[in-house]
Image (cartoon, rainbow, N blue to C red):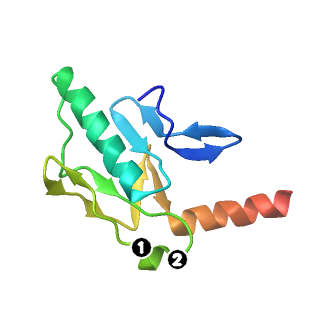
Amino acid sequence: MDGNQVGVCISGSAISNLRFADDISLLVDSDLDLQSLVDKVNKTSGRFGLQISTSKTEVQVIGRDTAQSVIHVKLDNNELEQTEDFVYLSGTVSIATLLVIKTLHAGWA
């Protein structure tokens, strides 16, 4: 995944993934970039004998007007479930969580 120019811009750097042990979160600005990154991770994992579980893999849209955003991303010809929130490192990530963080951060500025 290194050398990849897709991702979300954070402090001027493109961040495309967050990794901890066997958990990976992919971060991109478009569904096409997400599909491309999922395909790349799946192919690279396969080279090392690793398989991504389609039953444990979900996609999430975070941003403005997320209620209207439906994306279609496939892993090995299986469409991944789109979710409103997910657990990462024992914490729930959702649009509501991010809005609270953004509001708190704005209050500290």
> Which residue, as the protein is rendered here, is positioned at the far top?
48
Q: Is residue 46 left or right of residue 102?
A: left
Q: Judge whether 98 appears above or below 4 on screen.
A: below
Residue 97's spot in the image, x, y percent? 56, 63
- Calculate the distance from the C-alpha at mark 1 to the C-alpha at mark 2: 7 Å
Question: Could you say which is closer to the camera, residue 65 or residue 104?
Answer: 65
Location of the N terminus by quadrant is top left
Q: Nearer the viewer, residue 49 or 23?
A: 49
| Contact between labelled residues 2 and 1, with CB atoms less than 8 Å apart | yes
Q: Is residue 108 left or right of residue 4?
A: right
Residue in the image at 55% along x and 69% along y: 96
Residue 36 horizontal/vertical position (percent): 33, 45
Up the image or down, 38 lies above or below 51; here it is: below
Toward the bottom, the furthest residue is: 68
Pick the residue in front: 36 or 103. 36
Label 1: how many Cα within 10 Å (few below 14, some 14–19, many 20+):
few
Please tell me the numbered disc located at residue 41: none
Q: Secondary structure at mark 1?
A: loop
On the rendered image, what quadrant is the C terminus found in? bottom right
**Residue tagged 2:** 65
Residue underneath mark 1: 69
| Residue type of the residue flagged with mark 2 | Asp
Identity of the residue drawn at 36% across and 42% down: 37
User: In terms of secondary structure, where does tag 2 sit?
Assistant: loop
Q: Which residue lies at the image location 56% right of the left edge and 72% below the top edge?
A: 64
Going by the numbered disc 1, the residue's amino acid type is Ser
